Amino acid sequence: MKHLVGLLCTLTFFSCKEKTEKIPESLEDKAMRIHNSVITIDTHDDFTVANFTDSINYTQKLDNQLNLPKMDLGGLDVSWLIVYTGQGELNKEGYAKAKENAMAKFDAIHRLCEDYAPDQIELALTSEDVRRITKSGKKVAMIGVENAYPMGEDLSEFENYYNLGARYISLSHNGHSQFCDSNTGEEDGKWLHNGLSELGKKAVAEMNRLGIMIDVSHPSKESMKQMIALSKAPIIASHSSARALCNHSRNLDDEQLLLMKENGGVVQTVAFASYLNTEKSEARAAYMRKLYDEVADSLGLENHKEIRKIAKELAAKREDAVLGVAVSDFVDHIDYMVNLIGVDHVGISSDFDGGGGIEGWQDASETFNVTLELVKRNYSEEDIEKLWGGNLLRVLDKVQEVANTL
């Protein structure tokens, strides 16, 4: 009897032990755990005002790349919505038209946060706001300005933009502005200011005073170098990648990357195919154009949206399909910059609805795939937190801290 009891106790012991042994965490489970625990920030998302009305807005799963349902699906916490204005003539008429466009975009963002979906998304102005809002379960909107052209020659407009919620501003876009030269000057070697204009130099000081991050993704290299020399606070590149891996003027070369590190700033790697691998992007685009024609001809279709949808489905099934730029290419740029300037100076952006989007991160619903790739490459949770937004918030804090001393 004693032997039987002993046997039962032994069996019970091993049975309990088996039950208490932990099942190893899979790579996907680890990635999801990390993704859900860090604050994920995308620093560049364009939009059209037409998607910000009482009947059509970001509470709906629209056909665009970023909206609230897609942010929910992908676990994206923070979107920097962009007040973008194209470059026009440097005169009063041009400035006035551009200002009208910019104000309409500011108004659209405020309507989303205050009228259409105040229970789902809130505008943040500081890192403390970001943490408070995400903790509440709501999504976060922040405002970046792509091109200071609409401000004309009135430096007081910077304070107006700040009061409307802008927390980073680029002094130019595609084309030289009244403030500085653009990277596009590399195409013909023609420059307007050889860097910053005198007005641009004053703008740098004004942004420092207000606590607005200076964005150098579109200005020329010389403009960027002059901004770093003049700025009393760290700067950012809101959506640029490594020029050593993809020789595009929108990317930063090693000299610029090292200056960003010295400055204490951050480079937000961008998921824009032609800025990650131009050759691969062009090859895929050429292949898809042929496929679009094939679909249109064989099915007699004229609806471009339907043609693209069918062609994309066909490409996914064909073994001979030319592969597009993917999340792995994107993280190659992160790897390169982390190795060169350190993980504290690198971040993440998509440029959704402005040309961005790659295989595996075509829209906000696929955001988790970026974290998964980072985990596959053995980035720690601490490093992933920095890449996904910790670095950007640190720079924002420092910029605002400097402003308090001026």
Image: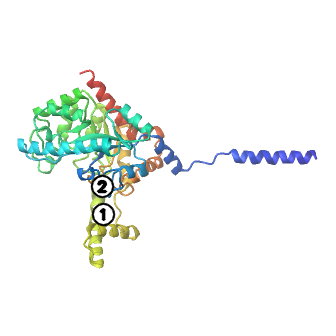
The CA distance from mark 2 to mark 1 is: 10 Å
Q: Is residue 258 left or right of residue 219?
A: right
Of the two numbered discs 2 and 1 on the same chain, state the one appearing first in sequence. 2
Q: Quadrant of the C terminus?
A: top left
Residue type pointed to by label 2: Ala
Residue to which mark 2 is pinned: 273
Locate residue 405, reporting x and y percent. Answer: 26, 21
* 293, above or below 67, in the image: below
**Residue nearer the viewer, 344 or 112:** 112
Q: Position of residue 367 (x, y in %)?
A: 40, 50
Residue holding disc 1: 284
User: Which residue is more in the foreground, 266 or 293?
Assistant: 293
Whether residue 191 appears in this view of the structure is no
Q: Nearer the viewer, residue 33 or 180?
A: 33
- In the rendered view, does 1 fall on the left or right side of 320? right
Q: Marks 1 and 2: in contact by CB < 8 Å?
A: yes
Any mark on residue 162, and which?
none
Q: Quadrant of residue 137?
A: top left
- The answer to whether 161 is drawn above or below residue 350 in the figure is above
